[in-house]
Amino acid sequence: MSEDHATAQDSSPIPAPPETPTGGSRASLGIRMLDAVRYGNTAVLTLLALLVAMAVGAVLIAVADADTRTAAQYFFSAPMDTLGAAARAIGGGYAALFQGAVYNPATASKGTLAGVLGPISETLVNATPLILGGLSVGLAFRAGLFNIGGQGQIIMGAIFAGYVGFAWHLPLVLHLIAGIIAGIVGGALWGGLAGFLKARTGAHEVITTIMLNYIAFNFLAFLLGLKGFQRPPYGQAISNVVDTNAQLPPLLGNGLRVHAGLFVALLAALGVWWLLSRSTLGFQLRAVGANQFAARTAGMSVERSYTVVMLLAGGLSGLAGVSQILGTNSAITQDIDAGIGFDAITVALLGRATPGGTVLAGLLFGALRAGGVQMQSSTGIPIDLVQVIQSLIVLFIAAPALIRSIFHLSAARGGIGQQLAKGWNG
Amino acid sequence: MVQPGEIHALLGENGAGKSTLMNVLYGLYQPDDGEILIDDKPATFRGPGDAMAAGIGMVHQHFMLIPVFTVAENVELGHEQTRRLGFLDHRKARHLVAEVSARYGLDVPPDALVADLPVGVQQRVEIVKALVRNASVLILDEPTAVLTPQETDDLMQVMRALRDGGTSIVFITHKLREVRAVADRITVIRRGTVVGEALPSASSAELASMMVGRPVLLTVDKGIAAPGEPILQVESLRVVDEAGQVVVDDVSFSVRSGEIYAIAGVQGNGQTELTESLIGLTRLTSGRVRIDGDDVTDESIDEILARGVGYVPEDRSHDGLVGGFTIAENLVLDIFDQAPFAKGMNLDLKVIDDNAEHRVQEFDIRTSSIRANASTLSGGNQQKLVLARELSRPLRILVVAQPTRGVDVGSQEFVHRRIIEERDNGAAVVLISSELDEVLGLADRIAVMFRGRVIGEVPAGTSAEKIGLLMAGANVESTRDGPAAATQEDAP
């Protein structure tokens, strides 16, 4: 057949579209980076979305600041007063955010380990369950499902892990492993249930996972009033304390909260990376997620894929519950999930549903959470502002066209952000 | 440039930029550069509304009609005439439809529900819609893709009547025969630029080489079939869809090794469901499917494919490819979990890439990289990609549906040759096509489907006209003296 083919090769090859920097082009790094900016690749768009969100956040800080508002009343006679006050408020706010999340010169000058690494420790503690939850949402998303059930899965994971932690009494390493496995199982059951319902009956996973959230939440409320689960003397809605043997050990001594759950999260990220990019199962999950019809035509079982991915995603959320109950806290309370189930959606979105991106996004959101506390206590800017900034980030990522038009980037390409923005028909 | 009262054909391969150009003209896309001139005056369209106001009407490939509305209601949609108190003036709309319909011989009943009308008439409703809004330029985007040969002839009559009435028509197509039959002038587009103008007197071969940029073989070169054992047997196959409609009704046939069995028919007469039920995608309501004598009716898709069945679905971007996957990944979509592509639970990326390099070369898939997403490929290259995957396994049966739909002339030749090669290697080939030329060129036996039934099985070499009549249900009373027998014209 080669001789027939000679004619076909005469015509010039189709020129490579410029917006595929991954396409094996041999362009220099500089040119590729320029292209990335011009055509707005996902990393650049994410970064820009972050910047815009911070900028809008800055405006909100200024507006919320009492001094700035007072100065604004005589803006036209002394505009610099207003601008100065706004600059002070914004600078102070973001400085406090930084001090709470990364490095605080005031505490560091004491020279203690806790003083220097305290903020980082807080960031990592907050980031750990966010990364795990984000991996859960991201994995499900790559398989074409919206896992809104992080909250329920975290709660079930925490209940299972917590119960094993305080009701069983095992030797040192063994107890922790048992607790972790129990947490995975609890979350996997809860997630897998939604996947099974989707596979068997076509029930939409958004509906079922949200409903399962309510069930888990109220099941926990019930357990927290149950003897054997509730901590004596039964005055408060709090569970028994898990054995020390079952707790994730602190990484930097008892003075700092960061615990071995961080390693669990990083290992999980590695596992998800392997699953998605190196394994046959992940290939199938991604194929179903990207085009279930073609996947079915190629002989894959779409139903099995849904069930399996929700089991895995639930397991990852369960691990977030483990991190909460065996690491950060040592007893279960009603708000054990601490909003992680929902922030995880944002983390996955910011991380573009890739494991590496999710780790980075989890760290950023962990930092925002840690810094938000500091910001509120030292400048009086409400911690809600952190929530606003987080939401703005999502908003801008979900609307890449908006970011493109703000920064005059050309060539819209379908990215995962666009998919997330429009894809509620899973 | 389009003159008043002419049929101007825009001829080009898929992905040449015809539709993009027309969407710019219709205000759906904004031009990056350049101007649109109407009556020598520059015009800018911010949306279809502006284009309509300027007298440009468009009939899309996929109709923009509401099936549960009547013709008149569809026509007035968006331009409703109201009487006092905001009551709709249906009478006026009906009147208008009847009048326009009569003027151009469109034969569109104003009070019929659109859902009840044949596709050809639905298309004329679209034309009426444009005419009622005083379109002086009518853009028809691949209008014949969904029509029977007879309906196509009818449409050409309508186009001529409109032209004689002073309407300009832009006729977008990649079918040479139609262009030569109806166009007054032809503009050929290749890769986004106009490569030349031609008159309808130009030969098909000339037009084709302008489109593709090189000489093209238009006929299929095929040896005599050497059929062997029956491989695929279908017995009384019946499919009832979710709505309770019988879409495949008592279909039986048998395909032998080394022959191409074509199922001809206009789209939507049950061929899709029939094909899908062959490989297990659609569950049968009753009937049996046997492969090599084994009953596979209740087997999963996976199991059926593993018996050596290759399947090229009619909608390749929907069912054949994962657009967001790379070319390399798409090439192993059905065998990714088998050796040598998988080692245990791990994918062997190196083997997958090597396979891709090999296939891309063998099937001449034009791409910048095997890591490019399948969605970046043109229609023809996507089809080659699907074929490359399906033909990479030893096949007992090859089921190909609409193998050259949306595929450029240059790739059509290649696709056809590979199908024949597969036949000559002893596979039983089932070809589903609504392109009469393709059926005539490839088939060793031809079945015609109409409303879910096989209404005739004829040998290769049956005249195009007879098959065309069968495709229209055989009880169509008239064939206008159009270029019905023109299929032979394409032979050089």
Image (spheres, helix red, strand yellow):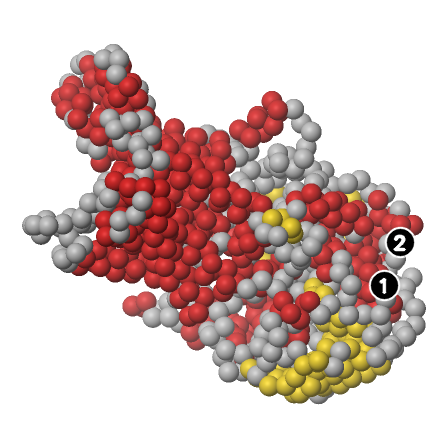
In which quadrant of the rendered view does residue B219 lie?
bottom right
Chain letter for mark 2:
A
In which quadrant of the rendered view does residue B357 lie?
top right
Q: Secondary structure at mark 2?
A: loop
Say which of B5 and B109 sits in front.
B109
**What is the three-letter code of the residue carrying label 2?**
Met
Q: In the picture shown, does residue B204 fall above or below B105?
A: above
Q: Residue at x 63, y 56 (%)?
A: B337
Q: Secondary structure at mark 1?
A: helix
Q: CA distance from mark 2 to mark 1?
A: 10 Å
In which quadrant of the rendered view does residue B235 lie?
bottom right
Which quadrant holds the N terminus of chain A? bottom right
Q: Residue at x 51, y 42 (%)?
A: A273
Dot 1: few (<14), some (14–19), or many (≥20) neighbours within 10 Å?
A: some
> Where residue B14 sits: x, y (%)?
71, 53
Does the CB distance between marks 2 and 1 fall below 8 Å?
yes
Dot 2: few (<14), some (14–19), or many (≥20) neighbours within 10 Å?
A: few
Say which of A57 and B392 sits in front.
B392
> Where residue B440 sits: x, y (%)?
83, 72
Residue designated by label 2: A1
Q: Residue at x 66, y 46 (%)?
A: B348
Say which of B118 and B292 sits in front.
B292
Give the label on residue B421, or none.
1
**What is the three-letter code of the residue carrying label 1?**
Glu
Give the label on residue B484, or none.
none
Chain letter for mark 1:
B
> Where residue B296 sits: x, y (%)?
66, 78
